[in-house]
Structure formats: structure tokens, C-alpha cells
Image (cartoon, rainbow, N blue to C red):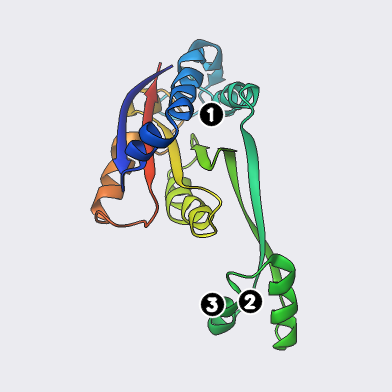
Amino acid sequence: MRIVASYSHLNGLEFLIVHHPEIWQEIQDVIASLDASICKTKVSKEKNMVGNILYSPTAMNKAIRICFERQQWKESRVSYWVTQDSKLIRRTMQMSASEQKAEIEAAGHKPIFSYNQTDFVKDRVAVEVQFGKYAFVAYDLFVKHLAFYIRDVIDVGIEILPMKELQSEMSSGPGYYEGELYNLIREGRGVPAVPLVLVGIAP
């Protein structure tokens, strides 16, 4: 696979190049090491593509996960408790999970367990690889990366997406770089308030 395009939001790429050039190089190497041809395994059943052999999102996710894990990138998960009271949520947001639960219970509310998970984290850099439905990209950018940044777990988030040329050879539904770049820029220069790098890849 190859990186076709990238976009730096709030100086995310500049931060990587200055503070973690080895991490940025490692990400480029992981992408370059992926053999896209072994992921073209899905037989389409969609009306306008019946019988076509498409790139399998599952196979691509598995292949890229293996490559990142070889470089010691690991999944990260942050657990927390939520409730229906907005004031209580604001008061407990910066507490540890156990403190959140106790505070919510003490206020007479029922705590609900939740968590944020990101695909790969290393040296305070998070990477999400998104070959799923387009709605998941917004969740990654505006919830996952932002939540980890606010909790001071990461300094920058990276979102890896298929370019349109790759997405057009997948089942319908996945987001693609050009479309998500438009969505990100449309929000304005400061939204979301987390340094990001959008990366578009293709065979």
C-alpha cells in the first residue's frame, strides 16, 4: 500500500515530524509493507457489483493490525462511568473511574459503565484504521481521538482511510479520504480541538 495524501489538522503532522519523526517513519513503513493484493478476497453480492472481487475490510484490518503489533503498537482503552445528570458528568469527568462511580452513586444516580478504545497507541500517538462505515470516521475524530487527547493520554491522533480509488473497489459504505477531508475542513480550523493527521492510502 502507499500513502497518497495526508492532511495536518492543528499542526498534527508538524508535531510528529518535530517530536516523533521515528513514529511517523514507522507508520509510513507499516503502510508500505502491506500487500493489498492478499486482501482482495470478498465476492460482492451487491446489485451493481455482483460477482466482483473486492477488497475485504476485515482482511485489510487484520493485515494492518499484524504490521502495527510487530512494531509494538498496542490497543488502548479508557474506562469511565456516565449518568443522566449533565452537571454531575462535568464534575466527575476528570476523576478516576472508581471515583466517578462513587461520586455518581453518592449523588443518588445510577452509574453506567462505558469506555473509549483506540486501535493503536505508542509514545502518546494514537492510530485509528477505518475501513468501516463512514459514520465511524466522525466518531473516531470527534469522540475517540478527542477523548484521549483531553485525558492527556495522547498528543496527536492519526486516522488512516482509503482513498476513493481504493474505496470504490470495496463494498458500499466505507468512508474515504477525500470525503472525510471535506467534512473535517467544513467544521472549521479549530474543530475538533485535537491535533490530527488524516492519511489516505491506496494499493
Where residue 189 appears, as percent x and y from the top left, is 25, 54
**Residue denoted by label 2:** 83
State yes or no: discs 2 and 3 in contact (Cβ < 8 Å).
no
Q: Quadrant of the N terminus?
A: top left
Is 105 above or below relative to 140?
A: below
Residue lying furthest bottom: 108
Callout in the foreground (2, 3): 3
How far apart in space, not on screen, are marks 3 and 1 (Cα)?
A: 37 Å
Is 150 left, or right, of 179 in this rendering? right
- Tag 2, which secondary structure? loop
Q: Earlier in the sequence, mark 2 or mark 3?
A: 2
How far apart in space, not on screen, are marks 2 and 3 (Cα)?
A: 11 Å
Where residue 133 appears, as percent x and y from the top left, is 47, 42
Q: Quadrant of the C terminus?
A: top left
Q: Quadrant of residue 164?
A: top left
- What's the residue at 38%, 44% (across, down)? 196
Q: Amino acid at mark 2?
A: Thr
Is 38 above or below relative to 117?
A: above
Label 2 crowd (10 A; few <14 / some 14-19 / many >=20)? some
Where residue 190 appears, as percent x and y from the top left, is 29, 57
Residue 90 is marked as: 3
**Residue denoted by label 1:** 57
Q: Amino acid at mark 3?
A: Arg
State yes or no: discs 3 and 1 in contact (Cβ < 8 Å).
no
